[in-house]
Image (cartoon, grey):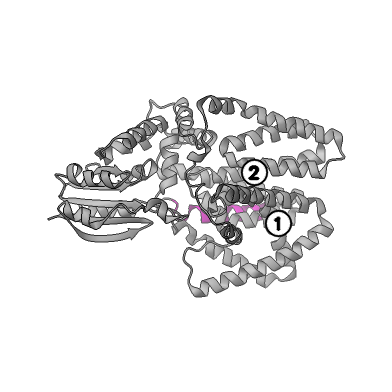
Amino acid sequence: MIKKEWLLILLLLVTGLLLRINNLCGRSLWTDEFFTLFQASGHGTDISLLMKTLTKDKQPRLLYAGQLKHFMRLESSRHLSDVITGIRGTDTHPPFYFGIIYLWMRAFSDNPLAVRSFSVLMGIVSIILAYWLGSLLFSKREGFFCGLFVSICAFCVRYSQEARSYSLVMALGLVSGLLVLRLERGNKKSDAMAFSVMNAVGIYTHYFYIFIAFSQFVYFTFSHHRETKLLRRFYMFFMLSLLFLSPWVILLFFKGYNFYLTEWIFGYPGILEKFHNLLYGFGQYLFIFYKPSFGTLVMLSAGFAWFLYCLWLSLLDMRKNYPRALCFCLHIFILPLLGMLFIDIIENGALLKQERFWVFPFLGFIPLAGYTLSRSFSKNRLVTILFIIGMISSSWPVSSLYFGPAPKRASQWINEQSQAQEACVIIYGIRSVILSQAYYLDDRIKLLPVLNKPQLTQALGEGCASAGKVFICRHYHRTDSSLMDQPFMEAEDIEKSGFVLEEASLINDISVFEYKRR
């Protein structure tokens, strides 16, 4: 029996690994992953100083692609202290993930495959953790289906292939959930201490991990309000986890923290749209297809409707047979969603609109999905198997999808078009945008980052005086394309500068306009 159990777990791990290594190094790094590269390599402070200079200059500064590439390479002179200092300078992220990636790159190199492989590892670990969580909440049978869900879920696969912190957040949240369940059953000090540390590490990884911590706090208070001794121990170690955060909080306090520098979070109006985003985000847990065909959309809708029906029946069954487990799942799933909705409405935010932030409520959805698949498998095995196949068919191609501006193909096209000629790339945007474009360009190609129409005019005049070809690049953001598409690039201004449009294309959310000197 034990041998069969481990064979099933091994099957889950192998399946999950195959889905996660599919096209792992074939897909271009995208904008946010370059943020990981320059921060984890200890160049955050250098980038911050460069960007301040670029924004203050009245005319655009000429840079070579080769000059910018070293910001994304781990040099022997860089230390962990440089990573921490750089993170403090950007104001938008806590330091733990970048510190881990710094050590990971020290051990395995700074190439994209090596950097992404840490997220793959966390994704595989999450399969085992999901199995344990389901087993603890229900039984080993449900635990297997929880592990199966994490193994084949496109949402999990997608973040297990990205050099960002979300795969780590998922693993930490699952460990934290396991410790909460162990603590309420055994009231052991060791579990309470481990929970305290894990809670702090989670917030040191991503500030929005506070959603998970808060949901666990409310769950424990609601479920054990009559158990004074147990509740007192939980509160004490929960407060201890906040104490672990105090060194970083103090540093931010004296420096001055500006939460609004998290540039993709705020500035998206439309209250009614938030509720549409709730439904869309929930659907992303089951399937991810970018621009599906009509036939695929019909099948996705049918699968989604079937799963919702099975989920409703499972909730009724859990209420009868596993009320404490249902309480845990709903708290961990619903409260983070309400927190995101609150920020979206109050601050005109876009947390619900962005798929990555759905990782926080996802931790409560995993056992709900696992229980639903287990129950539906018992009731209707054929339909459940077809649904599982549908999930796998969504997860396999997800490694070929781009979820933001990915510059590899656009840069390669510029390299080919500019052969034997002096070329200049004018790029709208700062920070990760210019770095990501430079990463795949030939070292000899010049880059001119511009922020407005006057800088564009100067770039075309003085900056590109000796260039035979000029390429203008704009990186779009799928949450709101207008963020990266401000109307300052009028064609007549470019033509007045002595250039003629040869070709224009949109490649992986990057528009490239090729101009040739008359």
Label 1: which secondary element = helix
Q: Which residue is mark 1?
A: 368
Q: Which residue is depicted at the point 44% across and 58% down?
A: 400
Q: Position of residue 151 (x, y in %)?
A: 60, 55
Q: Position of residue 357 (x, y in %)?
A: 56, 49
Indicate the amino acid at tag 1: Leu
Q: Which residue is mark 2?
A: 211
Read off the magenta span: 6-24
Query: In the picture, which quadrant includes the C terminus?
Result: bottom left
Q: Residues within 10 Å of mark 2 (few under 14, many from 20)?
A: many
Label 2: which secondary element = helix
Question: Is residue 21 shown in magenta?
Answer: yes
Q: Is residue 346 above or below residue 278?
A: above
Q: Is residue 207 left or right of residue 108?
A: right
Q: Which residue is depicted at the point 76% across and 40% down?
A: 182
Label 2 vs label 1, nearer the camera: 2
Q: Is residue 292 above or below residue 278?
A: below
- Tell me where residue 209 sits by quadrant: top right
Indicate the amino acid at tag 2: Phe
